Image: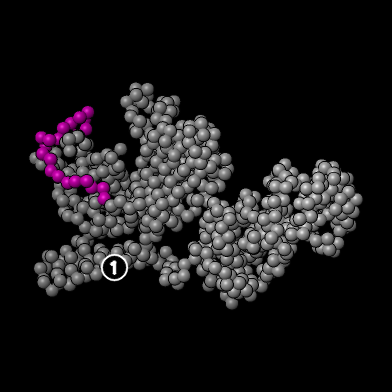
Amino acid sequence: MDMNQYLSMFIDESNDHLQSLNESMMGLEANPEDLSIVQVIFRSAHTLKGMAATMGFEDLASLTHQMENVLDLVRNNKLRMQDFIFDTLFKSLDALESMVEDITGGGEGKADVSAIVASLQAIVRGEIPTAAGAAAASAAAPAAEAPVFLDEFQYSVLEQSLQEGHKVLYVDVAIRKDCQLKAVRAYMVFDLLERSGEVVKSFPSVQDIEQEKFDHSFSLYYITQKEASEIQAMILNLSEIDKVTAVALDQESLRQMGQDTVAATAEAPAPVKEAAPVSNASPASAAHAKEDAGKPAPARTGGAPSRTIRVDIERLDVLMNLFSELLIDRVRLEQLASEVQNTDLTETVEHMGRVSGDLQNIVMKLRMVPVDTVFNRFPRMVRDLAKSLDKKIDLIVTGAETELDRTVIDEIGDPLVHLLRNAVDHGVEGIQDRLAAGKSDTGTVNLRAFHSGNHVFIEIEDDGAGINPQKILQSAIKKGILSQEQASSYSDDEAIQLLFAPGFSTAEVISDVSGRGVGLDVVKSKITSLGGNVVVYSTQGKGTNFSVQLPLTLSIIAAMLVRLGTEKYAIPLSSIVETGIVKQTQIRSIHGNKMVEFRNSHIPLVSLSKIFSVPDYDESTEEETEIVVVRKGERLVALAVQDFIGQNEIVIKNLGKYLPEVQGISGATILGDGQVALIIDPNAFIK
């Protein structure tokens, strides 16, 4: 069977499962006792394993199988989730993502994951990683972490021994990897221990150890009168012993352990040994599906069948381009009908206009996707960043269902990553600083999206220390961006906007995560290129808010058509505040710049005819001039035009590689009369 035809489906579904696994793992980390989440994770991992095995990606299937072994112990109450288990599982997910990326890029999905597999196997065996500080841990820790379960009799023996003044030890022995007769060494350890006490329980069982069915290490519970350090030293004196950990248990640790003993009457790893091999993924999949079907479904799984289909985005792009051509023809027909004055033609064109309007809404909605497709990677990113920076941070995501055009979604990811990393690294203070400032030790970063008019706003707000405007001004003076006199005239808001200046930074030490100001100019230019805007608000001691304003779509916009001589231009309606007429006597000249009064303030008047060198129009020769007031953030500018033609929907066409980045022009469109009109970028006129 040719698997290539299923490859794109496999990649899509694998990415979905990996995303689901990441989200569920985050949920489980927040609520480690919720076994329903473990069931969701297990099923996702199991499905991914089956898919990978079917497609022949053995490394991917093998790693997922090892993850499954760990999750199987957890869902059967034989292993408690702990930090090092979460870390290992998250590393496994990262490796799986890398493999899927490799497959997406045409590779075979192969990777060296032996270290991660070894860690997962060690967790299944009940070994506590040295990184977790097993030797230095308290007496309660090993008992709580060790999955070497005791039956009720063994537990009561240990408890009674403690009450009678004996010592109960948890001993972990590792034999050297190059040992040829590890069963003999294990026998010597048992023989040595039985001279000074009694071994109550071992894992693996004594029988398995005698038959060498263990992987160079074993654990046991031991009753003795000797100290833990003494027992440890005695075992280490034997040859070919690599490492020994002996920890004394007390009543409290035994009591915690007792919570597990009621359910754990069988050997802990037994279910793992019975797990289906990777090569039998399909039958195993059916068996697990049957097994899972009998269990209560977790809350997150919906009962309704899916009513959606996957469509290649390129097909939607083709559909969008075809509709764009149809829209241009519709406008052309409308103009011809108005010229011909034929009733039948006019009615037909009007009907066509209504139908194409409905079609336009459908096409636009097909391309609209929730911002959740971008947001879903951030919880994991913030979790990892906070951990690496030793901070406690809650990321609260709201409005993830807000929809944006796919072209905007594809572009907005990187700027948001940069702003979020800034918020985590420089926005939220460290734990000690927060406590000293009278705040809780856990910082909050809000990531919210919402519609407003024809725009979508995405805000990244932290409750950190805020931005110090004086520090920014001092840095700007030091870098020669501002003089001392200029800085003294800057307001706090103007000072904060300096963060977006190229290469500007207030960070004394630039970390590998981010630096407040480093790269923010890139963020701003990217958002501006999308027709959006970014504004920052900050209050010292309370936090910072980066507000990103984005257009709903970049393909079809409503615009006002204006005339300058024989040329026509389109101004996006979303930028227009008002239109009006000013007399020459109302135009004032201030420091060589023309200004007009607008709502009790004076705003700049920009001559488009001069900027674009229009040969047959000059507004200075007229008594009255039409103006279009446009907005960029809080700033306004009046554009002088000759005539208003009217409002229309236009299809944006880029200028191509021959006219790159013409100042003040964001693209072109074809009008109903076949003439090409340039689309004005109002942001370019507002500095």
The quadrant holding residue 360 is bottom left
Q: Main secondary structure of the magenta part?
A: strand
Q: What is the secondary structure assignment of the residue under circle 1? A: helix
Q: Is residue 204 above or below residue 277?
A: above
Report whether 320 appears left or right of 426. Answer: left
Residue 451, given in percent of the width and then of the height, sits at 33, 53
Judged left or right of residue 232, residue 647 is left
In the rendered image, residue 645, in percent from the top left (x then y), is placed at 16, 54
In the displayed orientation, state which residue is furthest to the top. 485
563 drawn magenta = no
Quarter placement of the N terminus: bottom right
Q: Specify the amino acid type for callout 1.
A: Leu
In front of the other: 194 or 658 = 194
Per the rendered image, the range of residues in magenta is: 574-594
Image location (x, y in percent) of residue 592:
21, 30
Can residue 67 be seen here? The reply is no
Of the pair 314 and 552, the residue shown nearer to us = 552
Give the crowd class for mark 1: few <14, some 14-19, many >=20 residues within 10 Å: few
Residue placed under numbered mark 1 in the picture = 359
> Is residue 57 left or right of 597 when viewed as pictured?
right
> Which quadrant of the figure contains the C terminus?
top left
Q: Which residue sits at x=14%, y=44%?
A: 580
x%, y% of residue 506? 46, 32
